[in-house]
Amino acid sequence: MGAALPGLLRARRLSRRDVGGLALSDTLAPMSPERQEPQYTFSEEEVAAKSALARQFLETRSRLNAHVTAADNFLVKRYYNLDHNTYLEGGALPAKIKELMGLVVSAGLRCDDCISYHVIQAYRLGASRGEQEESLNVALVVGGSIVIPHLRRAYALLAELYPG
Amino acid sequence: MGAALPGLLRARRLSRRDVGGLALSDTLAPMSPERQEPQYTFSEEEVAAKSALARQFLETRSRLNAHVTAADNFLVKRYYNLDHNTYLEGGALPAKIKELMGLVVSAGLRCDDCISYHVIQAYRLGASRGEQEESLNVALVVGGSIVIPHLRRAYALLAELYPG
Amino acid sequence: MGAALPGLLRARRLSRRDVGGLALSDTLAPMSPERQEPQYTFSEEEVAAKSALARQFLETRSRLNAHVTAADNFLVKRYYNLDHNTYLEGGALPAKIKELMGLVVSAGLRCDDCISYHVIQAYRLGASRGEQEESLNVALVVGGSIVIPHLRRAYALLAELYPG
Amino acid sequence: MGAALPGLLRARRLSRRDVGGLALSDTLAPMSPERQEPQYTFSEEEVAAKSALARQFLETRSRLNAHVTAADNFLVKRYYNLDHNTYLEGGALPAKIKELMGLVVSAGLRCDDCISYHVIQAYRLGASRGEQEESLNVALVVGGSIVIPHLRRAYALLAELYPG
Amino acid sequence: MGAALPGLLRARRLSRRDVGGLALSDTLAPMSPERQEPQYTFSEEEVAAKSALARQFLETRSRLNAHVTAADNFLVKRYYNLDHNTYLEGGALPAKIKELMGLVVSAGLRCDDCISYHVIQAYRLGASRGEQEESLNVALVVGGSIVIPHLRRAYALLAELYPG
Amino acid sequence: MGAALPGLLRARRLSRRDVGGLALSDTLAPMSPERQEPQYTFSEEEVAAKSALARQFLETRSRLNAHVTAADNFLVKRYYNLDHNTYLEGGALPAKIKELMGLVVSAGLRCDDCISYHVIQAYRLGASRGEQEESLNVALVVGGSIVIPHLRRAYALLAELYPG
C-alpha cells in the first residue's frame, strides 16, 4: 500500500492499532511466505485527491470500519485477514488482475461499495481505463441489465479517475 | 409489542387503522392459538430515543409504510400477516432466536433495511451484543466479503444500541 | 417515445448524439422489421412533472448515463440496444405487459432503479395502478419479505403517479 | 384445475386430503370473493401425457410435496395458500399473464423447478409458444448469460409441449 | 465430532491427513481458546445409517472433497478453517442454534448442499424436528416461494431423520 | 476455435447451420474489426477426450442447445452473439483472462454450468491450474461458503483436466 496514510488509513480493513487477540500485524499479515503486498502506483490519499467520488467512498468506509475495529470480533478479523490475502501479489495471477476479478464478481453480485473498492484498487495498481471497462463488460453480459444501474455509477467514478 | 406507540407506530407493518377487507386486528392476528406477541424489553420509541440510526430507519419505514397501508392491497396485507406470525412467540424456537435468524438471512441476502429491522427487534427482545455479532458472523462466512459493507453499517447501529 | 424531450432526453439509454462506431440510430434501432417503438400515453417529461420521485430518478439516470455515453464502449452500446429491443412493440406480448414483466423480475432481483424505471414505463404505456400492484404481488410472493423494502419505495412512487 | 387428477394430484401444492388445522379447502381457498380458479385448457394429466419432461417434473414434485403435506406445518400451509391465491383469476391481470410473470421472475432468479412449473401452468392456460419465449427473453436480458443454462432446459420443455 | 469415522470421515471438510503447509490439525483448530468442538449426539456414520438421503449427500461430499484436499490450496484451507470455527461451541450462541442459522441462510440463498449439511449438523446436535421446521419457516417467508423447491427436498430429508 | 468439430460442434452456442434471420456467420461474427477468435491450445474434442466430466457437460449442452437453435428466436440469437463477442481476443484484456473472469463471476453467482464452461474455455486457452484455482479463490472469498459446493465440483473437473 505504499506509504502509510495517517489521514485516510486503510479504509477497507482495520486501522493500524492493535485490535485485541489478533494484532493488526496479524490481520494484514501475508498467510504464506510468497505472498506480499503489491506495489501501488497511487496511494489512497492520491486517489481521494483526484476523485470526489472516491474520496467520499473511502471516508465513509473508514468511518464505518472504525466501528468494526472497535468491536474487535475475532472471526471478523480473521475474515478481513483472509480477504486481504486473497488479493496479494505472489500467486499465479498478478494483484491487478485479481482486483479486476474482484470488480467483475462485485458487479455481477451488484455491490456498489465493492465495485468502488475494486475500481480504486485496480486503478492504484495501474489498470488502464480500457481494462476496467472490459472487466465491467464481462459482468454486464454475465449479470444482465440489472447490472446497468451499478455500471452507470462505476462509469461516473471512472470518469473522475481517468479524466480524458 | 409492548405499549402502543402513537408516534412511531409499528414502523414495519401496518398502522393501527382498519385497512379495508382485512382489519388490522386480522393483519396482526396470530394464526394459531399457541402463537402470541413476544414480551419486548424495549419499545420502538425507546430504541429510537437511544439510537439516531435506529430512529432514522424506523421513521423512514413508517413514512413509506403509510403508502402501503393506504393502498389496502389484499395480498400484501396477507403477506404482512404471514411475516408477522413468523416471528411470534410460541413455536419451537424463542422469538429472540427467530429475529436473530431473520438477521442472518437478511445479511446473507444483503438487505440493509431488513438487517436494521432484525437488529432492532433482537435488541428489543433482549439479545446481547455478542449474540448479534455471532449471528452476523454466520452471515459473513456463509455470504462472503460482499456482506462486509452491510456488516459495517450493522456495526454502526450496534455501536449506538450497545454503547459499551 | 412520443415527442423527443430535449430536456430530459432518454434518461435510460443513450443521448441522441452519435456515440462512435455505433450511431444512436443503430443503438435504438429495432432489430427486426416487426419490432417498433410503442405508443406512449405520457412522455418522460410529463411523468417527471407529475411525480417528484420519478423526476429525481430520471434526472439522476440521465446524469449518470452521460458518463456511459461519453465512454462509447462498443459492447455496452450493444447491450443497451438489445435491452431496448426487448421491450418494443410487435412481438407475441404487448409492450405494456413486457414492462410489467420487467417490473416483476426487477422487484424479485431487488433493484430499486430497475423497479422505478419499469413502473414509469408501464405507467407511460397506460398500465393501471391495479396492474402495477398485481405485478408487484407476484414479485413479493416469489421473492419473499426481502422484497418488502423495495415494495414500500415502489408504493411511494405509485402514490405520486396515481394520486387517487 | 379442471377435473381432479387422482393419479398426479396437484403436484405443486397439497394433496386433496385434510392436512390438519388448515383443511385443504382452506389451503386452496380463494382469499377474496372476486378471486377464482382459472379455466385450464389442459389438465396436468394431459400435460404429463404430452411431455416426458413435464411428467418427470410433476411426479417428482408430487412425491416430494407428500413430505410437506405430511408435516402439516401451519405456516407452510399458509404460504402455499398465499402462493396459490397470487395466480388466481379475478384481479387486474389475467391468470395466464401472471403465470408468465412467474416464469420471468423464476428464470431471473434461476430456479429450474419454478421455471418448469410456470411454463406448464402458462401452457395449461393457453399461452402460445411465442408468449413463453418472449417472457423468457425478458428474463434473459434482465438476468444475463447466467440465465442461459436454465433457458436451454426451458426450451427442451417447450419443444415437447409445442412440438411443431 | 465424536468418534473418528474412518469410512465417511469428515465429509464436509478435509480428510484427516496432513494437507500441506497447513496441517489438518491447523485446519480444524479452534481459533481461540474458548472455542471448542461441540458434543454431537450422533456421529455422521449414525446419520448415514439412518437416512439414505443423508448418506448419499455425505458420500458425495466426501468424494468431491477429496479433490479439494488433494489440491492443498492454501487459501481454501484457511476458508475451511474459518468456516469450521464459525459453528464451534463456546461463543455467545450454542452450536445447535448456529447450525440452524446456517440452515436458514442456506435456504434463503437456495443452496441444496448447504441445506442438507446444516440439517444434518443440527440433527447431530440434538435439534428437534420442530426447531428445524421453524428455522425453514423463517427462510421461506424471507426468501419467498422460490425457496419451496428446496423446502420440499429438505422435508424429504427431515422425514428420514425424524421418522414418525 | 481451432478446427471445426463435426461431432461436438460448438457446444455452447449455435450449431453451424444458418439459424434464420440471423445466419450463424452473424451470430458468431465479431462485432468490431479488432475483435477476433482466440487461438485455442486445445479443441473441445480434445478436452472431451481428456475429461469425462467435461465430455458430459459439453454433450448435454450441445443436446440442449439444439432446442434453442431450432427455436430460432431473434433476441436469443443476439444475446448469444453478444455473449460470444465478450470473450473474444482483441480488447484491453486477453481472452484467457476474460474467461477466468467469467469463471469468477460464475462461481460467485453459483452457476455450475457456467463454471464448467469457463474452466474448460480457460483450459483451452492455456490457463494453468494455479490460475484457475486463484480465480476460484477470489470467488470463494467474495461469495462465501455457499460457493463451496460449486468449488468441490470445479475441483473434480480440474483434477481431470490437470491430472498431476
Image: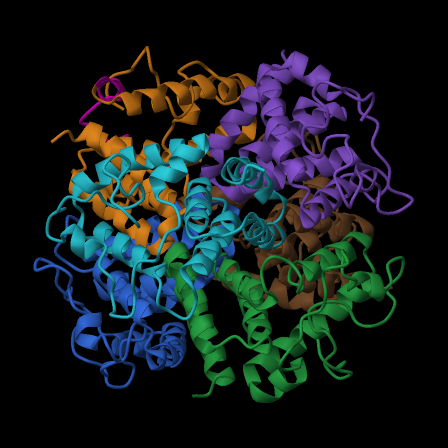
Chain colours: A brown, B blue, C green, D cyan, E orange, F purple
Can residue E32 be seen from the camera position used here? no
Residue closer to the observer: C27 or E131 = C27
Residue closer to the observer: F6 or A38 = F6
Residue positioned 79% across, 65% down in the render: C69
Q: Residue C118: horizontal and vertical position, in percent?
A: 57, 68
Residue B68 sits in which quadrant?
bottom left
- In the image, residue E13 sits, relative to residue B158, either above or below, namely above
Can residue C99 be seen from the camera position used here? yes
- In the image, residue C78 sits, relative to residue E52, either above or below, namely below
Left or right: F24 with respect to E16?
Answer: right
Classify the position of the C terminus of chain F by image quarter. top right
Q: Which residues are magenta?
A: E35-49
Q: Does the magenta segment cover residue E46?
A: yes
Q: How many marks?
A: 0
Residue closer to the observer: C11 or B95 = C11
- In the image, residue A13 sits, relative to residue E123, either above or below, namely below
Residue positioned 61% across, 20% down in the render: F54
Residue closer to the observer: D155 or B1 = D155
Task: Kindly give the residue lying farthest to the left in the view shown.
Answer: B33
Classify the position of the N terminus of chain F by image quarter. top right
Residue F84 sits in which quadrant?
top right
Q: Main secondary structure of the magenta part?
A: loop
Left or right: E20 with respect to F18?
Answer: left
Q: Does the magenta segment cover residue E26?
A: no
Q: Residue B65: horizontal and vertical position, in percent?
A: 36, 77
Q: Residue F43: horizontal and vertical position, in percent?
A: 76, 20
Q: Residue B95: horizontal and vertical position, in percent?
A: 20, 57
